[in-house]
Amino acid sequence: MKKKIPIGATIAHAYRFVFGNALAVFKAIWLPLLAQVAVAFLLMRRIALFLAATQAHDPAAISLFGPLLLLIPVALLFFFAQFTAATELALGRPAQSWIAFHFNKPMWRLLGGFLFGAAAIAALAIALFLAGLLLALGIDPLVKAWPGLRLAAAVAAGLMVVAYVCSFFFFSIRFLFLLAPVNVEEQRVGLRRSWQLSYRNFWRILLISLAIAIPVAIINQLYAFWLTGFPPNPPAGASKEVRDALQTAWQITQLNAMVSRWYLSLPLMGLMMWFQLGAGCAAQAFAYRKLTEDDGLAPIAGD
């Protein structure tokens, strides 16, 4: 019988771990976290400038796009350094030093595993898109021949879009939720193993992920609304161009406000990253141990 991840126990362990081991989590990730927050600050400034230039149809927007392409991979490297250290801690291997960036072999293997996972998800998404496109091309002659089928075809198209989006989340959760503990503990890329372990656990993993992600999203949104208020309400009958322009202007204002109040934005960003990594990695490690407990692995940290 396929094992199930205990939802309540996993969520409880995640929160207990991150708050009960707050200093240990901070010790494991603080240096790459500090670097990532600094890069994120530069990204916010650059994105605000890029959006403003794009909205004004300024040719300089092209020159502003290059630094974004450079900063995003740098931020990704610092994130995976934290991710690796937090996963090792959650699996019972605390950081040995306060001064470490964690650019080691486990970090590069974990980054490679997620890149392979992203490639697999992208390949599946493209395959599903092409299948849907072929199906749509096959339905189109039928609709032209029998106009009465137009409503049914529209409903079918809507259902296909919903199924496509849902399949993206399904593959992402199945491939990626357990990838970090598999990758770190078993010292292999672990994509296939992660897929196997998550079999018949999709909804459980989704609920666990939401229990950690929703509080972070709420706090971030409340902070954003506190800075700049709610998004603008377009006037009745406004065109799509007007609505898009108002939305972009609001995003620029929000980014500029976050940059100008960096003394609030950056500590909050670091705190949210600390919580999400600590609780998220603890949940993944706990779920992994529960699914592999017959393999004779050591107890997870915090148990």
Image (cartoon, helix red, strand yellow):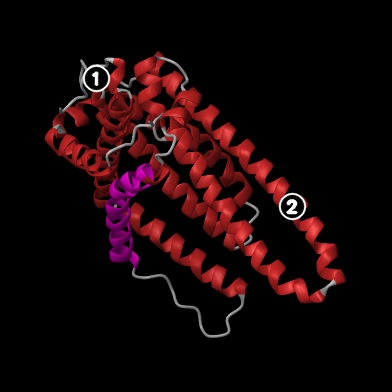
Residue 187 showing in the rendered view: yes
Question: Residue pushed farthest bottom?
Answer: 236
Q: CA distance from mark 1 to mark 2?
A: 52 Å
In the displayed structure image, the side of residue 54 where residue 221 appears, left or right: left
The residue tagged 1 is 99
* Front-lying residue, 92 or 237: 92
Residue 218, above or below 93? below
Asked if residue 195 lies left or right of residue 139, the reply is left
- Residue 251 in the figure: left or right of residue 274: right
Q: From which residue to which does the magenta span run?
A: 204-228
How crowded pointer 2 is (Cα within 10 Å; few <14, some 14-19, many 20+) is rated as few
Secondary structure beneath dot 1 equals loop
Pick the quarter of the image with the N terminus.
Answer: top left
When asked about the image quadrant of residue 271, the answer is top left
- Residue drawn at 63 percent across, 47 percent down: 62
For the image, the number of numbered tags is: 2
Front one among 96 and 129:
129
Look at mark 2 in the image and give the residue it sits on.
133
Kindly identify the amino acid type of the residue bearing the numbered disc 1. Ile
Which of the pair 222/132 is nearer the observer?
132
Which amino acid lies under the numbered mark 2 shown in the image of this protein? Answer: Leu
The majority secondary structure of the magenta stretch comes to: helix
Q: Residue at x 55, y 69 (%)?
A: 245
**What is the x, y in percent for residue 176?**
44, 34
Name which of mark 1 and mark 2 comes first in the sequence: 1
Q: Residue at x 68, y 41 (%)?
A: 127
